[in-house]
Every structure is written in C-alpha cells, then in structure tokens.
Image (cartoon, rainbow, N blue to C red):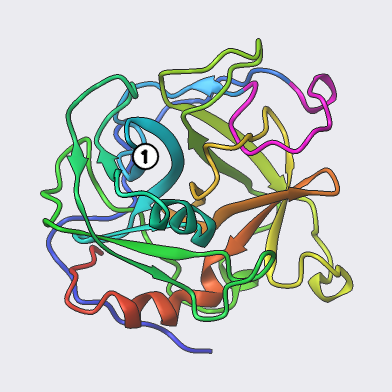
C-alpha cells in the first residue's frame, strides 16, 4: 500500500467552522424515483462557514456544478462538469459563499484537467486550476485528501457520509443557501460483487438526494478531527447515488497539481 506525501503549509485541512449536531430533514421514501443530482430534502448548513471547502461552479451566473477546494490553486470536481464548462466561455468558480446570490468570491479559471481514462461511468473526476491562489480563511479552506489508495482502509462502512450543495428543497423549490445531505455506503460487503460499484462509491440516501446542479460536489467522512473527501458526485443509477472514489485517483491528483500547496 502506498502512502502519499504532500508539500504542506501551516494551515490545517478538513477543519469545519463549528462542530455541531446535524439536523435531518426529509426521507428516502418521500422522494420520487427520477434521476436527480441536486440536494432535495436536506437541511440548511449552519453556521454558514461550516464547510469552507465547498465550491460553486457557475456558467454565466447560472449554477452548473459543485466542487471542493483541495489546495491553494485547484478545485476538485466531476469531469462531466468540465465538459459543460469547455462548451462555454463564462465559467467561474465561486468560493467562500453560503448564499449563491452573494456576488463575492468569484475566481477566474486558468485551465481544466480531466482524468485520462474518463468515460460515462468511470473516472468521472477532474480538476479546475484557478488563475490566482486561494488565500485561506475561515470561509475558504481545503478539505483533506485520503493518504492511502485503499478506500476500505480509511472508510469505516458504519460511518455516515456527508455531502452538500446548492439545490432544491424538499418542497421542490430552488435553494439559494448551502444544503447538507447525509448518506451511507450501501455496499458494506465485497465490492467486487457489484457490477456498477467496483470503482465507485455507492450511497443510499438517508435525508435527501441530488439533482442536476450539484454533481461534481464532494462527499466526505470525518477521520479523527478532520474531514476527508472520499467521493465526487457523478450520477444516479438503480436508485443509488454513484460517486467517483477519490482514494483510487490520489496519485493522479497529486501528479496533476504539482506546484500547489496542500495542508496537513
């Protein structure tokens, strides 16, 4: 098993703004079974800077995808979100905001990087390089990457997995504020027995689900006192949310983000 060593700064990654008990809202049985990738039935994130790694990708002021700050130059997202941005000249990344109507925090994009083996259901992961470095503060901090390639070594299957995004409420209306969602890994046994989940993280939603607009966003678990990103939202299939497993592409991420500073 390989361990990755990162260049580091004095800033700590994966630290939430405030630790508190999460309120739950909605349930899986009350949600229609159509294909969705935006948070529906989740709870508003409080306080507003609780998840400072969250990124919003906009296309000419329209919400496009989610993402996560992983270091001072790069945002992690889904490759299919980059596909959409490459077809437009108006994509920007917004950081440090809770309400999408806030005008601050827009970063211009320097370049896009998609995984070399990206396809519809495999390696749906990519990187957005920003034109200027992120100055970390209470509302903008990176989330930790897993340091080992084996997901089973770092994800206790009994743990709830958290994600967040700017999406629909349980009443079907658009949400301007960041919403959070809790799910659990539904494949607790041998992953090799699953045709669709061998290289993916497959979640059963506990208090909400996703619709288009929040794909590309991160899912994470707490290891010790830090949050580690374990998946990037890709697609919804057979009543389960599929996420690209970050632990399988850590080496690729580090190779493509040379020159950036990671936190510890």
| Residue in the image at 44% along x and 43% along y | 66
Q: Which residue is mark 1?
A: 59
Residue 9 screen position, x and y as percent: 13, 65
For residue 41, above or below residue 157: above
The relative height of residue 63 versus residue 53 in the rendered view (above or below) is above
The answer to whether 171 appears left or right of 52 in the picture is right
Q: Is residue 30 magenta?
A: yes
**Furthest residue toward right:** 193
Residue depicted at 72% across the width and 33% down the height: 206
The part of the chain drawn in magenta is 27-41
**Residue farthest to the bottom, as pictured:** 1
Above/below status of 24 relative to 132: above
In the visual, does 73 lie left or right of 254? left
Residue 232: x %, y % from top left: 53, 55
Secondary element type, mark 1: strand
The image position of residue 105, as x and y in percent, is: 19, 35
Mostly what secondary structure, the magenta segment?
A: loop
Horizontal and vertical percent position of residue 230: 53, 59
């Amino acid at each position: 098993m390989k361990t990755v060593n990162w260049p580091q700064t004095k800033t700590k990654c994966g630290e939430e703004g405030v630790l508190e008990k999460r309120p739950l809202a909605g349930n899986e049985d009350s949600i229609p079974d159509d294909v969705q990738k935006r948070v529906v039935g989740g709870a508003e994130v409080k306080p507003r800077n609780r998840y400072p790694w969250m990124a919003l990708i906009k296309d000419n002021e329209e919400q496009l995808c989610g993402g996560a700050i992983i270091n001072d130059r790069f945002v992690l997202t889904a490759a299919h979100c980059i596909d959409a941005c490459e077809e437009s000249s108006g994509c920007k990344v917004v950081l440090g905001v809770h309400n999408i109507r806030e005008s601050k925090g827009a970063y211009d994009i320097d370049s896009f990087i998609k995984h070399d083996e990206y396809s519809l259901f495999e390696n749906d992961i990519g990187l957005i390089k920003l034109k200027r470095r992120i100055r970390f503060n209470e509302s903008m901090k990176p989330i930790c990457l897993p340091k080992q390639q084996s997901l089973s070594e770092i994800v206790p299957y009994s743990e709830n997995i958290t994600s967040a995004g700017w999406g629909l409420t349980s009443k079907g209306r658009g949400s301007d504020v960041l919403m959070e969602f809790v799910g659990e890994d539904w494949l607790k046994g041998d992953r090799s027995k699953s045709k669709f989940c061998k290289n993916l993280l497959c979640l059963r939603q506990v208090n909400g689900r996703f619709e288009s607009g929040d794909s590309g966003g991160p899912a994470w678990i707490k290891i010790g006192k830090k949050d580690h990103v374990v998946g990037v939202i890709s697609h919804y299939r057979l009543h389960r949310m599929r996420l690209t497993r970050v632990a399988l592409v850590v080496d690729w991420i580090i190779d493509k983000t040379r020159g950036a500073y990671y936190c510890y």
